């Protein structure tokens, strides 16, 4: 089969059905009949000489060949969507940059990273937050340009990703200003029985911290566990408890004195990554951001 024999309308219909998993739903979304949609997919299967779907009850499930074709269709139509986004605003000289960040990442870190764009009159920013897997799916379908994460991701031929280390930061212990001491508190040795707020179980730091406490035989008194760093910052500021978190989360509170630094841990570090796809249109503003944050920038 030659490329000119491939009907991209058929491939588009297949892609929409594969994303929804239902002929009826996809037909309604595309304002066509279920029988017409089914005929288009059948013609694509005949052209390719392979079945793309198996039926399981009311759902259509991709075959192995279907999964392979779907991966290519995602790139083809994802890039098409990206092209349309790039064209949007061109007449006004605007460039849209779509940034996703995992929900457990500090919003202060995200703002610091995008700050050069906030004064750029030619950039239209789209900022999203969510679970890493969901954001990667959106990245792979070209609905995002970059994902900021505190967790590295694996890459393979089915999911060609670039995971760039932007920097890392020691984890600190903070508390109300009245707890300021002459010598730094040791993490975790000096935390036994202390009221403390921690990142939630989904955060990459939590397992490291728990392992340190177990190894040292230390049992802090857990008062709060919070996945969202912006919320953990507020808890640290208003509770009077100790809190273990990246310094960037409470940079403003440390500057104003509403919180004080009580100690640091050399054993606990949070890494920051920028994840992009191998197949993407290169946006000059994004490339300059990535180039401006070498791995040593936050050490």
Image (cartoon, rainbow, N blue to C red):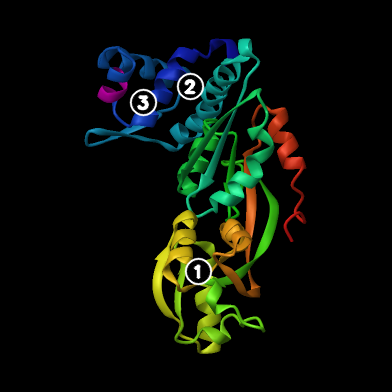
Which secondary structure lies at badge 2? Answer: helix
- The span shown in magenta is 23-27
Q: Nearer the viewer, mark 2 or mark 3?
A: 3
Q: CA distance from mark 2 to mark 1?
A: 49 Å
Q: Residue at 40% x, 36% y: name it.
A: 63
Residue 146, percent from left and from top = 60, 38
Q: Nearer the viewer, mark 1 or mark 3?
A: 1
Residue 98, percent from left and from top = 56, 32
* Residue at the extreme bottom of the image, as rendered: 217
Foreground of the two, 59 or 52: 59
Q: Are marks 2 and 1 in contact (CB under 8 Å)?
A: no
Which of the 4 quarters of the picture holds residue 239? bottom left
Q: Residues within 10 Å of mark 3 (few under 14, many from 20)?
A: many
The answer to which of marks 2 and 3 sits earlier in the sequence is 3
Residue 192, percent from left and from top = 49, 87
Q: Residues within 10 Å of mark 2 (few under 14, many from 20)?
A: some
Q: Is residue 200 visible?
A: no
Check disc 3 and report the residue beneath it.
17
């Amino acid at each position: 089969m030659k490329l000119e024999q491939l009907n991209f309308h058929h491939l588009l219909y297949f892609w929409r059905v594969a994303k929804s998993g239902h002929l009826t739903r996809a037909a309604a979304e595309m304002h066509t009949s279920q029988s017409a949609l089914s005929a288009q997919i059948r013609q694509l299967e005949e052209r390719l000489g392979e079945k793309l779907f198996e039926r399981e009850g009311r759902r259509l499930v991709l075959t192995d060949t279907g999964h392979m074709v779907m991966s290519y269709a995602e790139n083809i139509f994802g890039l098409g969507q990206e092209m349309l986004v790039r064209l949007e605003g061109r007449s006004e000289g605007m460039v849209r940059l779509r940034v996703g960040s995992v929900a457990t990442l500090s919003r202060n870190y995200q703002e610091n990273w995008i700050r050069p764009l906030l004064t750029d009159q030619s950039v239209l920013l789209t900022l999203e937050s969510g679970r890493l897997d969901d954001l990667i799916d959106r990245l792979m379908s070209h609905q995002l340009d970059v994902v900021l994460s505190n967790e590295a991701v694996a890459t393979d031929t089915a999911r060609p990703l670039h995971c760039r280390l932007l920097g890392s930061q020691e984890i600190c212990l903070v508390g109300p200003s009245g707890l300021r001491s002459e010598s730094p508190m040791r993490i975790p040795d000096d935390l036994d029985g202390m009221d403390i707020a921690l990142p939630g179980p989904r955060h990459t730091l939590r397992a490291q911290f728990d392992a340190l406490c177990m190894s040292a035989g230390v049992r802090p008194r857990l008062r709060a566990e919070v996945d969202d760093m912006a919320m953990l910052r507020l808890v640290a500021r208003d509770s009077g408890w100790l809190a273990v978190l990246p310094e960037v989360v409470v940079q403003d509170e440390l500057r104003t004195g509403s919180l004080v630094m009580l100690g640091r841990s050399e054993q606990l570090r949070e890494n920051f990554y920028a994840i992009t796809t191998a197949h993407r249109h290169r946006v000059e503003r994004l490339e300059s951001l990535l180039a401006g944050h070498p791995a040593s920038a936050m050490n």
